[in-house]
Image (spheres, grey):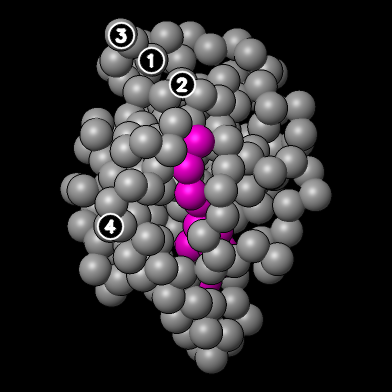
Amino acid sequence: MTTLQELETSAATCTRCELYKRASRTVFGEGKPDAAIVLVGETPGDQEDKQGRPFVGPAGRVLDRALRDSGIRRSDVYLTNAVKHFKWTERGKRRIHQRPNGTEIKACGFWLDAELGVIRPRLVVLLGAVAGEAVFGSRFRVGEHKGKAEEAEIGSWRGLVVSTIHPSAVLRGTDIQSRERSYAGLVADLVIARETGARPGQGGRDGMR
């Protein structure tokens, strides 16, 4: 049986799309190898690309706080991204995140499928539009799926997913009130994910295969 470590080693030399040419490294997933809940973000950011770990930048700090406030321990979940290379454009001395296109999202789906095939979680949380597109296709809109537990098939895994905003959306709020509303919505959706994932019989590990 393939292990997560073997997948990470293979992904380190991935050339399935052109993003590897400008990224510093492949940012693979990390966390509990038999986690009941897997959280799927969009792409690595600047800090993730530099450190080689998912969710270690500003959005990661928002997610850490939201996980705590929703009663989920980061050590109990597995964190990954739909696309595992940093796509960016230069603005002065800064590297600014760019959204992956459909071809890049589809190419990297190979690794997400493989991760879920090994972990077999009870539930997957989709953080943002890119993660949603990786599962539901290009017509996915966060607002239409937000906070709902829905059935989905991702490679060989079949189970429930809950969609919500990406933590970076909180940071993009134009004022304190909008940021607080976005954050409260993120926490509420993570509570739904925690409660849904705790139910016996959910997801790829317990019979919904």
| Disc 3, SS | loop
Please tell me whether residue 139 belongs to the stretch shown in magenta.
no
Residue shown at the point (45%, 15%) measured from the top left: 11
What amino acid is labelled 4 in the image?
Ala
Residue shown at the point (32%, 38%) measured from the top left: 206
Q: Could you tell me how far apart the alpha carbons at marks 4 and 3 are, in whole angstroms?
A: 26 Å
**In this rendering, position of residue 157 left or right of residue 95:** left
Mark closer to the observer (4, 2) = 4
Please tell me whether residue 168 belongs to the stretch shown in magenta.
yes
Identify residue for label 1.
7
| Disc 4, SS | loop
Percent position of residue 41, x then y: 50, 47
Q: Could you tell me how far apart the alpha carbons at marks 3 and 2 are, in whole angstroms?
A: 11 Å
Image quadrant in which you'd find residue 110: top right
Disc 2, disc 1: CB below 8 Å? yes
**Over which residues does the magenta segment extend?**
158-170
**In the image as oriented, which residue stretches furthest toward the right?**
139
**Quadrant (top left, top right, bottom left, bottom right) of the C terminus:** top left
Mark closer to the observer (4, 1) = 4
| Disc 1, SS | helix
First in sequence: mark 4 or mark 2? Answer: 2
Identify residue for label 2.
114
Relative to 82, does residue 183 appear above or below in the rendering? below
Identify residue for label 3.
1
| Disc 2, SS | helix
First in sequence: mark 2 or mark 1? Answer: 1
Q: Could you tell me how far apart the alpha carbons at marks 2 and 1 are, in whole angstroms?
A: 8 Å
